[in-house]
Amino acid sequence: MLRRVAGVLHAESDWPQAVESGLAALLSLIAADPVLAHVAFFEAPAAGPPGLDCADAAMDRFISFAQTDLLPEGIEPPPAIVLQAVGGGLWAVIGSELGEGRGSELPTLAPELSAFALAPFGFS
């Protein structure tokens, strides 16, 4: 799943648009597979440390858009703790929406969640 998202990220030449497109792709994939979404957001973390490690690794791969070598020239990455907070915030919002039965609506949140993810880089 994250390979498809990475492909979308790398297909865009405009970095903020690439982040939004990648997030939109991720949200669409999650919305399209409710079973996988439930396992990823609820079952895996409930499995204890190994499940939490898998969930953390998945979010780390998603926020890889902020890797220094992928950032456009002149854009500095925020501190690692800020990136961790962005990843955790995205995870929490997605999980909350799934828990409330609004998984099919996730793709509509891409613009707002992208703005949140890009804010630490100076984009609004």
Image (tube, rainbow, N blue to C red):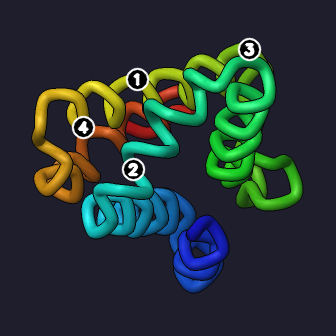
The residue at the point 36 percent across, 58 percent down is 30
Question: Spatial distance from mark 4 to mark 3, Cα to Cα?
Answer: 25 Å
Rendering quarter of residue 124: top left
| Label 3 with label 2: CB-CB less than 8 Å | no
Residue with the mark numbered 3: 81
Rendering quarter of residue 78: top right
Near mark 1 (Cα within 10 A), the count class, few <14, some 14-19 or many ≥20, is: few
In the depicted structure, whether residue 57 falls above or below residue 36: above
> Which residue type does callout 4 highlight?
Leu
Badge 1 or badge 4: first in the primary sequence? 1
| 94 lies left or right of 19 | left
Observer-nearest of 43 and 32: 43
Badge 4 or badge 3: first in the primary sequence? 3
In the depicted structure, whether residue 26 falls above or below residue 62: below
Between tags 1 and 3, which lies in front?
1
Between tags 1 and 2, which lies in front?
2
Indicate the secondary structure of the residue bearing disc 1: helix
The residue at the point 38 percent across, 67 percent down is 29
Question: Spatial distance from mark 2 to mark 4, Cα to Cα?
Answer: 8 Å
Question: Spatial distance from mark 1 to mark 4, Cα to Cα?
Answer: 10 Å
Residue with the mark numbered 1: 92
> Which residue type does callout 2 highlight?
Ala
The residue at the point 12 percent across, 52 percent down is 105
Residue with the mark numbered 2: 37
> Which residue type does callout 1 highlight?
Ala
Indicate the secondary structure of the residue bearing disc 2: helix
> Which residue type does callout 3 highlight?
Ile
Badge 3 or badge 2: first in the primary sequence? 2
